[in-house]
Amino acid sequence: MAWDSIATIARKVQAGEITALDQVTAAFKTIEDKQEFSAIIATLEDRALERAKIIDDRIAKGEAVGRLAGVPFIAKDNFLVFGAETTAASNILRGFTAPYQATAIERLEAEGAICVAKANLDAFAHGSSTENSDFMVTKNPHDVTRVPGGSSGGSAAAVMLDMAPFALGTDTGGSIRLPASYCGAVGYKPTYGLVSRSGVVAMASSTDVIGPITKTVDDSALVLDVMSGLDDMDGTTIPAEAAGYIDLNGDLVGKKIGVVKEYMAEGIAPGVRERIEAAIEQLKAAGAVVSEVSLPSLPTALAVYYILCPAEVSSNLSRYDGQRYGHSYKDAKDLTESYKKSRSTGFGKEAKRRIMIGTYVLSSGYYDAYYKKAQTVRTKLINEFNDALSQVDFLLGPTAADVAFKIGENTDDPLKMYLTDILTVAANLVGVPSINIPVGSVDGLPVGLQLMAAQRQDRALLSIAKKVEELQI
């Protein structure tokens, strides 16, 4: 089924025109009918149906229900959610059930939303294609021979396959925006800290961000409005804007948009460049003041990311030792062998690669040469972004250098796979909000436009993104 907007579904459920139970049932029917895309790791049927009945009963009694009453959604399987295992698509977490729920899930459920399924991802969110899942390879909704992007590929595919009106993803270096670009969805990465990370399996804690994947900017804004704000369980959270993130009313006329020179350099596929340039012309015609800006250190962003990110990964994954929860090697002769065998059999190839890289750059003798230097360049990137965003309101470029690639095309070349993040990692390193907006297609495959704003300017970014969306580029 094709879903109405999130606000429309909730309004109809509240008015008794449709039931929450019907919405949940419809979501499960679509998930079942489209299993061949391998977007879903697990469904939460018992809990979701029970929650739907409770919401319908409350409405029948005239009781108040939330802004998302009866709206089904899907969570990436690195969110702690009741009703199914939380595996992060890794064998080492098989059998783990959440003792509590992620703050983002709690806030959505408090407003009446109903989690119906857990989406596939690259294991522990390590990847750009969802091929690194230990369980399955998700397929692109537009072409089953191609990847959906990653690491939130299952979430993006699920939304575009109409399994639910929205899905949650995590974005550490582009993992919401890249699959949104490849699948033709709206993918929103908020300012770092705007949405609590409590109850979400950590990848790289200084760049991890929680955000929505939807079909429209308004839907993303509403989900963000519900999830955002301070959380006592996450000391890195920041207050939401007083005006909130709904009722968007931006205007393109007079807005200064900087096209990032380094994002439009060599390496962008001709078809993608054509779509982005066409979008730029339409923005000019709509009254935006478009100019070129340069971020000289931007070409170093990918190298910086792949030093800092594995360093944090190696630290965050040290807790998975086979002793307290998750996979444990049963035939170990002693504790040392239990540690070694549990991790070597539980972690996949990409997790091991990142653990080894991260441990190396943090080790004595290499910390100053790699990790410390990368942090210095990160600060330089932050300063360059701040400077650029003091001169223009927004930054613009493609989200990905090309359309979705073939399944298996890059699996034997880790460096080539890492290069798919080249246009998205900088926003995570500097903590600014960023959004992917679909801007047409090349040979039937979606192309995404990326917009960025200064930190804590999420409402302004969403407002202008809605105007870009309305141009129907």
Image (cartoon, rainbow, N blue to C red):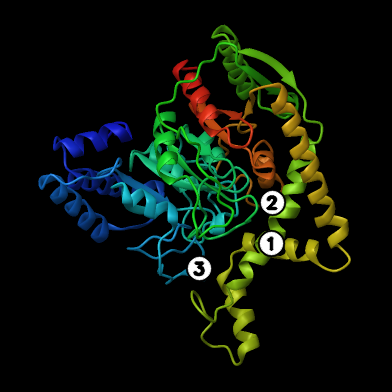
Mark 2 or 3 closer to N-term?
3
Specify the amino acid type for callout 1: Arg
- Identify the secondary structure beneath mark 2: helix
Mark sitting earlier along the chain (3/1): 3
Disc 2 vs disc 1: Cβ atoms closer than 8 Å? yes
Q: Indicate whether 289 appears above or below 315.
A: above
The picture places residue 306, in percent across and down from the top left corner, at 73, 51
Query: In the displayed structure, does residue 392 sit left or right of residue 254?
Result: right
Say left or right for 431 vs 97. right
In screen coordinates, is 98 left or right of 3? Answer: right
Q: Amino acid at mark 2?
A: Pro
Residue 107, placed above or below residue 165:
below
Q: For the residues marked 2 and 1, what is the alpha-carbon distance in whole angstroms?
A: 10 Å
Q: Secondary structure at mark 1?
A: helix
Q: Residue, x 61% and y 92% (percent of image)?
A: 334
Q: Residue at x 62, y 28 (%)?
A: 398
Residue 158 seen in the current view: no
> Disc 1 marks which residue?
353
Q: Mark 3, residues whose alpha carbon is within 10 Å: few (<14), some, or many (≥20)?
A: some
| Of pointers 2 and 1, the one earlier in the residue sequence | 1
Which residue occupies the foreground of this view, 407 or 265?
Answer: 265
**Up-down relation of residue 227 to residue 87 (above or below):** above
**Residue under label 3:** 91
| Disc 2: which residue | 414
